[in-house]
C-alpha cells in the first residue's frame, strides 16, 4: 500500500512500501508553465534517514533561482542539455581550466568582462584556441539555458567575442587512397575490411560504425539503421536525436556484409556457437560477438593510412571523404546532411562550404548550358 505524503519544507516523502520512500523537492520555477519544477529520487532505508536525505537534497538546491551559483547552473545544464556523452566529456576537459572561483559566483552576477577574463586566464594557462572554443560553446549554452529558465536576465557570453579558431586541416583520402586502404585491410583479414568499407560507404562516425549489430543491417533491402554509438564505457546513444537514421548502402558493400555474415556464422559454428542478432558486425570475437574497441580501430586505421600513402588521415577523415565525394558529384546538401546525421544542414554547409561554392559555380554553368541548348 502507498503511504500518505508528508511535506517537509519544499519537499515531500511518500512511502512506496515498507523501507522504500519516494522523495520529491522543488528546483525553481519552470518559466514555460509558471509551476515548480520538481526532482525526485527513490530512497531505501529508515524514515529518519529518508527525512535526512530529503533535507540534503533541499539544501543543495538554490533557495531561489536568483542565488544560484554558476556551478549549480552547470549541474542543471549538464542534466538536461541535448549533448552526447562524448561531447560533454570534451566540454569537461576544456572547463577544467576555468578558474575555480568562477564557479562560486552567482550566475546572475556574471558579466561579459568576467567571461573575457576567463578566456584570458585559460590562454595564460596554455589552453589553445580549440580548447577555448569548446569552453565558449559550453558556457554560452549553459547561460542560454539559465535565461530560458528565468534564472538570469541575459546571457553574458553573447557580448564577448568568440575566440577565433584556426581552420583544422584535414587529410581527406582520395578515392584512389580509399581503394588502396581497402585492399590492404582485406589482405589482413578479420573485420578490418568490413569496418573500413562501412565507414567509407556510409560516412558514419567511428563509434556509430563500431556499434552496428546484425539486427541493424537489412541484408535484403541494403540499408543500415544507425541507432547507437560506442564509447569507452560501452554502447550508448548517438550524438543527438537527428543522428538516429536509416542509411542506404551500395551493392558492393552489401555483398561484402553478406559474405562476412556467412563467414562469421561458420567461424562461430566450429566453436558450437550461433551468431546472435545483437552481436556486433565489426567483431573479431567468434564466441560472444563483442565490438572492436575504439582505440583498436584508430590504431588500425593509422597503420592502413600510412601504408596506403596518406599518413595523418584519421578515421573521421573517411567521413569527410564520403561527404566530399558526394558533394563534388552534385548530391544535395540535404541528402549529405541526412546521411551524416547532422542535426542541421547549416552544419554540413559550415564544414564543406568550400565544396558548395564550386558546386554553385557548376550549377550556374549548367543552367547557362541548358538555356543555350534551348536557343539553338
Image (cartoon, rainbow, N blue to C red):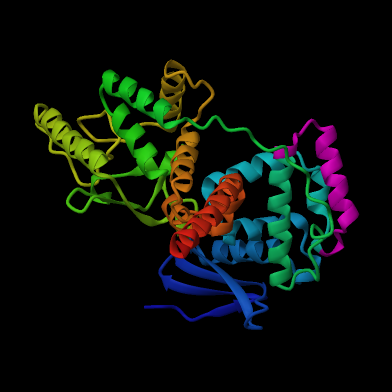
- Give the residue displayed 28% in from the left and 23% down from the top: 186
Any magenta on residue 110?
Answer: yes
In this rendering, would 318 be left or right of 287? right
Q: Position of residue 35 (x, y in %)?
A: 63, 82
Q: Quadrant of residue 122?
A: top right
Q: Quadrant of residue 274?
A: top left
- The residue range painted magenta reads 108-130
Residue found at the far bottom of this picture: 34
Q: Position of residue 276 (x, y in %)?
A: 18, 43
User: From the image, which quarter does the C terminus lie in?
Assistant: bottom left
Residue found at the far top of this picture: 307
> Which one is nearer the viewer's eye here, 247 or 180?
180
Q: Position of residue 350 (x, y in %)?
A: 61, 50
Residue found at the far front of this picture: 376
> Which one is nearer the viewer's eye here, 137 or 36?
137
> Which one is nearer the viewer's eye here, 333 or 119?
333
In this rendering, would 315 be left or right of 158? left
Q: Position of residue 272 (x, y in %)?
A: 9, 31
- Give the residue displayed 66% in from the left and 39% down from the top: 93
- In this rendering, the answer to whether 227 lies above or below 282 is below
Q: Main secondary structure of the magenta part?
A: helix
Residue 285 showing in the rendered view: yes
User: From the image, which quarter does the N terminus lie in?
Assistant: bottom left
Q: Quadrant of residue 134?
A: top right
Numbered disc total = 0
Any magenta on residue 106?
Answer: no
Residue 296 showing in the rendered view: no
In this rendering, would 186 be left or right of 89? left
Amino acid at each position: 500500500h502507498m503511504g500518505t505524503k508528508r511535506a517537509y519544507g519544499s519537499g515531500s516523502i511518500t512511502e512506496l512500501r515498507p523501507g522504500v520512500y519516494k522523495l520529491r523537492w522543488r528546483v525553481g520555477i519552470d518559466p514555460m508553465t509558471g509551476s515548480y519544477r520538481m526532482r525526485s529520487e527513490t530512497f531505501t532505508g529508515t524514515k529518519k534517514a529518508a527525512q535526512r536525505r530529503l533535507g540534503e537534497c533541499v539544501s543543495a538546491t538554490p533557495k531561489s533561482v536568483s542565488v544560484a551559483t554558476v556551478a549549480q547552473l552547470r549541474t542543471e545544464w549538464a542534466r538536461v542539455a541535448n549533448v552526447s556523452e562524448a561531447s560533454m566529456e570534451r566540454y569537461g576537459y576544456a572547463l577544467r581550466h576555468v578558474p575555480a572561483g568562477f564557479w562560486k559566483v552567482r550566475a546572475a552576477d556574471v558579466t561579459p568582462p568576467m567571461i573575457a577574463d576567463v578566456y584570458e586566464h585559460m590562454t595564460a594557462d596554455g589552453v589553445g584556441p580549440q580548447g577555448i572554443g569548446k569552453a565558449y560553446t559550453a558556457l554560452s549554452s549553459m547561460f542560454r539555458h539559465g535565461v530560458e529558465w528565468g534564472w538570469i536576465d541575459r546571457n553574458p557570453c553573447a557580448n564577448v567575442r568568440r575566440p577565433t579558431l584556426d581552420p583544422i586541416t584535414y587529410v581527406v583520402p582520395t578515392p584512389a587512397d580509399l581503394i588502396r586502404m581497402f585492399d590492404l585491410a582485406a589482405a589482413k583479414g578479420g573485420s578490418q575490411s568490413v569496418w573500413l568499407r562501412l565507414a567509407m560507404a556510409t560516412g558514419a562516425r567511428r563509434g556509430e560504425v563500431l556499434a552496428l549489430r546484425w539486427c541493424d543491417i537489412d541484408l535484403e533491402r541494403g540499408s543500415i539503421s544507425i541507432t547507437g554509438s560506442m564509447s569507452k564505457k560501452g554502447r550508448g546513444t548517438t550524438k543527438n536525436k537527428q543522428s538516429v537514421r536509416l542509411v542506404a548502402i551500395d551493392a558492393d558493400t552489401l555483398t561484402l556484409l553478406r559474405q562476412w555474415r556467412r563467414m562469421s556464422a561458420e567461424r562461430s559454428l566450429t566453436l558450437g556457437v550461433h551468431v546472435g542478432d545483437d552481436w556486433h558486425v565489426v567483431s573479431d570475437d567468434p564466441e560472444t560477438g563483442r565490438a572492436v574497441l575504439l582505440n583498436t580501430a584508430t590504431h588500425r586505421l593509422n597503420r592502413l593510412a600510412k601504408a596506403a600513402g596518406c599518413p595523418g588521415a584519421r578515421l573521421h577523415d573517411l567521413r569527410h571523404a564520403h561527404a566530399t565525394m558526394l558533394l563534388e558529384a552534385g548530391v544535395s546538401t540535404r541528402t549529405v546532411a541526412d546521411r551524416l546525421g547532422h542535426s542541421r544542414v547549416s552544419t554540413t554547409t559550415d564544414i564543406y562550404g568550400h565544396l558548395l561554392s564550386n558546386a554553385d559555380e557548376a550549377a550556374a554553368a549548367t543552367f547557362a548550358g541548358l538555356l543555350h541548348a534551348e536557343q539553338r
